[in-house]
Image: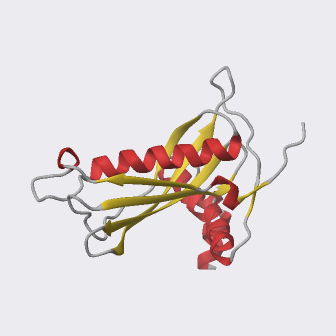
Amino acid sequence: MTITPKRTQDSVIQMTELVLPNDTNTFGNLMGGRLMYWMDIAAALASMKHCSAPVVTASVDNISFENPIKLGNVVHIEAKVSRAFTTSMEVHLRVWGEDPVQQYRYKSNEAFMTFVALDPNGKSRIVPPIIPDTEDEKSLYDGALRRRQLRLILSGKMKPQDAEELKALFA
């Protein structure tokens, strides 16, 4: 079976949400859990778009909140597959807040999530490779193997001494 590689841009998902009172904490800021929920949906859509199959979340990297998004502001989430492995895909997410009254955008956060594609029996299936085009896409693609090795070490699925890409950083 031949699997045709796909361009990174073919997986891009842009999601927009309005921050309403039910989405906020007592400080009037978007709750982190609500943002993570929206990010998970955007990342799942990007990975499904890439592999044309159902997917499940396998891991979520560290999510740091740089700037809060206030009540009444707009959330913009961009998700795209940064690299595909055999059955999994790393998805890069960027999140911006936008003040619609003052009309300016600001960065809220950035994260990586990993998804696994499923076949009709719920088993993992092979996904198409990614072809990065832009310098940003190439940089994300190149770093994905190191991030993957770090995830595998932290989850106990890889021994640190086997992480060749990570060891190369320190040699």
Q: Is residue 74 left or right of residue 50?
A: left
* Colour option used: secondary structure
Looking at the image, is 102 positioned above or below residue 87? below
- Find residue 121 and report its image quarter: top right
Residue 143 position, x and y percent, is 62, 68
Quadrant location of the C terminus? bottom right
In the rendered image, is residue 157 in sight? Answer: no
Residue 135 position, x and y percent, is 68, 77
Q: Residue at x 14, y 58 (%)?
A: 28
- Seen as rendered, the residue at the extreme left is 26
Q: Residue at x 61, y 76 (%)?
A: 169
- Find residue 76 and report its image quarter: bottom left
Q: Residue at x 17, y 49 (%)?
A: 21
In the rendered image, is residue 45 in sight? Answer: yes
Quadrant location of the N terminus? top right
- Seen as rendered, the residue at the extreme front is 101
Q: Is residue 141 left or right of residue 75?
A: right
Residue 88 position, x and y percent, is 64, 45
Q: Residue at x 76, y 47 (%)?
A: 128
Query: Depth check: 31 or 168 in front?
Result: 31
- Seen as rendered, the residue at the extreme right is 1
Query: Depth check: 125 or 43 in front?
Result: 43
Count of numbered labels shown in the rendering: 0
Query: Depth check: 64 or 52 in front?
Result: 52
Residue 42 position, x and y percent, is 49, 48
- Find residue 130 and report its image quarter: bottom right
